[in-house]
Image (tube, coloured by chain):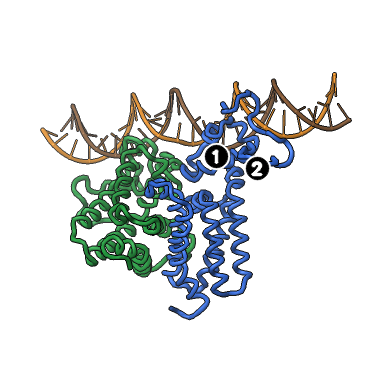
Chain colours: A blue, B green, C brown, D orange
Amino acid sequence: MHPESPPTHPVVPSPVETPPHPVTRLSTGDELRATALAQFASIGFAGTSLQQIADAAGYSKSSVLYHFASKEALLGEVLTPAIDRLEVILDRFVSAPDGAASRRRFVDDFIDFLLEFRLELHTFINQAQSLRGIPVIDRAGVLIVRLSDTLCHDGASTEDRIRFGIALGGAAYTLVAGMTFLNKDIAPADEIRQALAVVIAELLAPVAVHTSQSRK
Amino acid sequence: MHPESPPTHPVVPSPVETPPHPVTRLSTGDELRATALAQFASIGFAGTSLQQIADAAGYSKSSVLYHFASKEALLGEVLTPAIDRLEVILDRFVSAPDGAASRRRFVDDFIDFLLEFRLELHTFINQAQSLRGIPVIDRAGVLIVRLSDTLCHDGASTEDRIRFGIALGGAAYTLVAGMTFLNKDIAPADEIRQALAVVIAELLAPVAVHTSQSRK
DNA sequence: GCAGAACCTGACCGATCGGTTAACTAGGGT
DNA sequence: ACCCTAGTTAACCGATCGGTCAGGTTCTGC
């Protein structure tokens, strides 16, 4: 089943503490989380079976359900780190004094978030509607609405809201699906980050200007 | 089963030709196509069962499989009109002389396409990767690549390609998921179209300028 | 009246779904 | 030796999956 040689359980090089050198070896739970995330993002939560996750990770379906109470719980554990991170970023932004510097740092933080949690964002963005009721999804939903309301105050125009939506959905798409599909080259990372910064800032700039200063 | 009163088959008001007044009544096949599209776009192709489609449309699963050879064939019939339309738009653009007017008309056509086939685009955009091999998906894939290559010539920068990807994925997201989720108001249609035109043109403008004229 | 096409359906098929249970293995502490 | 815990798995459960099939109903052409 596993690439490892012995027929017993596959990993667990050091049962206590994290390994001294940050080895690339992951715990079984982390392996399963990563595998599940990749499947949820590409095939969808409803379209991914526990058997597929187990096969892809090299375990049995029973093992997946040993580490996670249910499929929904697995989704929850997969998405939670991204939500926590976004919450921190947003809290820091709203508690900072209004100003160009604060806004600039927020956009930087947000782009870091996009790049680090692209699969989680893609999963949420494209499936939140059909997964309403699952606690982690609802929590992420209110967070996104808060993000939207923070950037686009009550009186924001339709165009401002569409700018925000396009930035959010466009980044989620481009960084996952569009990457291996439109940009055949594997992309030089730094170049992507820089280009993303330009375009996202351009999309969000009028919104921010509109909310904190006078129009145009 | 059906909202109609008699227990027999539900619609078929005029068995031959289209009804003289374009009544809102749809043929069974059209009802099923529309229902399936809504489910595919929100829950995903893999996550949507034929039973769900049948229930939502008020028919039996057997009836769905009577009108469509298989689930994949249903997906094909659902997506084909959008692909045909996009193909027409793209052909007209590449066969027209280069120029600002041609580009402007293309963006207009493209926005019409986005608004009319938002569910079809959303379905393709977010699931093409996992549905590779299905003929209609592959056909749409080569079309999108052709669209990308037409707008971004070989030497296009990473930023240009990201602009295109964000415009495409962002519009698909905003017009479907973001609509009932971020913009609580049902949206005044014309306002959405106009805002979309501004933002899409802004995203695509540097690309077009770059490919047909000098930079900036 | 009658044959046939078009339409819709319940019953059924093997496969797979998410999830439960019990059994097994290995290691640590005593 | 002992037990306990953690990890893994096969076997199994009822439900549902996509798909097939035979039969019933209604309409049309003759």
Mark 2 or 1, which is nearer the eye? Answer: 2
Residue depicted at x 57% and y 70%: A102
B206 or D10: nearer the viewer: B206
Residue depicted at x 41% and y 66%: B187
| Tags 2 and 1 touching, CB below 8 Å | no
The image's mark for residue B147 is: none
Q: In this rendering, is residue B76 above or below C26?
A: below
Extreme-bottom residue of the structure: A214
Q: Disc 2 and disc 1: Cα gap in Å?
A: 20 Å
Chain that bears disc 2: A
Please state the horizontal and vertical placement of residue B180, each as a whole percent of the image. 46, 60
The image's mark for residue A22 is: 2
Left or right of A171 in this view: A71: right
Please state the horizontal and vertical placement of residue B39, each as a whole percent of the image. 42, 47
Q: Quadrant of residue A60?
A: top right
| Discs 2 and 1 carry the same chain letter | yes
Residue under circle 1?
A: A35
> Type of residue at label 2?
Pro
Mark 2 element type: loop
Q: Quadrant of residue D14?
A: top right
> Type of residue at label 1?
Thr
Chain that bears disc 1: A
B197 or B152: nearer the viewer: B152
C17 or A5: nearer the viewer: A5
Q: Quadrant of residue C11?
A: top left
Please state the horizontal and vertical placement of residue C22, each as a whole percent of the image. 69, 24
Mark 1 element type: helix
Residue depicted at x 62% and y 35%: A65
